[in-house]
Image (tube, rainbow, N blue to C red):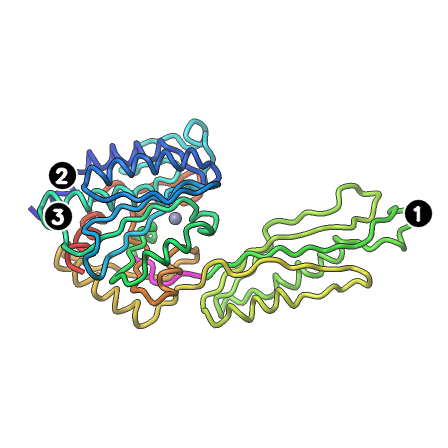
Amino acid sequence: MTLLRALEHALPHTLEHLERIVALESPTNDKAAVDAVGADHQATLRALGATVTVFPQANVGDHVLGTFNPGQREPLLLLMHMDTVHPVGSLLSAMPIRHADGKLYGPGVCDMKASHVIALSAIRALLEADAFPTREVRVLFTSDEETGSRTSRALIERLAEGCALAMVMEPALANGALKSARKGTGLFTVRATGRAAHAGGDHEKGINAIEELAHHVLAVQRWTDYARGITVSVGDIRGGGVTNVVPDSAYFRTDLRIARSADGPEMVERFKGLRPVLAGASLTVEGGLNRPPMECDAGRLATIEKINAIAQHELGRVFAHAPSGGGSDASFTAGMGVPTMDGLGAIGDGMHASHEHILIESLPERAALCAAMLRDW
Ligand SMILES: [Zn+2]
């Protein structure tokens, strides 16, 4: 029986598994909730014969690693995150688990709980077919990807070291394409301080922090350069509070995306180089890049070619590839020079939105691709 056929056969079990994991809502900021997903995966990994290692965290969920064939050379790394952006309770209000038109809806179903069962069912299918590779396979479930992987980055980089391939199980692009490039992401907070004064009687003595900040909102927005793949978006702004007082403080937070590593230092420099416009005002800038871009270089194209040779052989088809505007942990492994492929997860839509869903029929094929890559890489 081919891997695809076996995984089609296993689909009811895979779906049951997926619904169980989606029902465990797991926003990044709820440690206990994310740990419940981790506990479920620990049990599954042990049942599959993996050695399980837990990396305890104080404020986010514990990271969970399953290792098969420890010590065998040139490991493969399967990289997934357990956290979602949806608050606990979404399931009962806006996002109940439901099937409709061949789609499965639910919080985090596409990003990226379907990926969890794709990877785990791929491993199960290989074990059942007695086709599991003899090399080491590392299956890492992290807990804080959606907030920038602050506690998991070092672990990801340590486990990617020396790997033949990092398989980043983020969802596929809408048409099933692999993600061959990722934007680098940054976050900056710009804070203006002025001087408070009565807005009527002492207007001339005040230094308006909101006015100061407004200059910088317009300045940083203008740094957007679509041709270079650079975007800046001020997404949060606060300051003042009452209208009859000249406000003495205000701040904004902004998202930065870059397509090319070479643009990183320049953009950071520009933010750090912001200077006050109004006499007497002061300005502080905090932040920086939190993920480097993953560029579609010759190495990435060679990786895609190798994947498509495996896909052609196993599935009788090849996959397209395209860049993704979002960020992912693929940037960390790619940044180390480890061969990396992103977008190996399910086909779906509505990530981070209330209509998030996957195409159920994509599960067996993506799992078969994952299994064939593990077996043949
Ligand atoms: Zn994701």
Residue 213 spot, x, y in % from top left: 71, 56
Disc on res. 201: 1
Point 45% across, 66% down: residue = 259
Relative height, residue 211 to residue 17 (above, below): below
Q: What residue type is labelled 3?
A: Leu
Q: Which amino acid does label 2 sit on?
A: His
Q: In which quarter of the image is residue 163?
A: bottom left
Residue toward you, 65 or 330: 65
> From mark 3 to mark 2, how far is it between C-alphas?
10 Å
Which residue is under mark 3? 3
Q: Does the rendering let one see residue 100?
A: no
Disc on res. 9: 2
Q: In which quarter of the image is residue 187?
A: bottom right
> From mark 1 to mark 2, how far is it between C-alphas?
78 Å
Residue toward you, 195 or 254: 195
Q: Give the range drawn in magenta.
A: 178-183
Point 68% across, 61% down: residue = 216
Point 74% across, 53% down: residue = 210
* Within-10-Å neighbours for mark 2: few <14, some 14–19, many 20+: few
> From mark 1 to mark 3, how far is it between C-alphas?
79 Å
* Within-10-Å neighbours for mark 1: few <14, some 14–19, many 20+: few
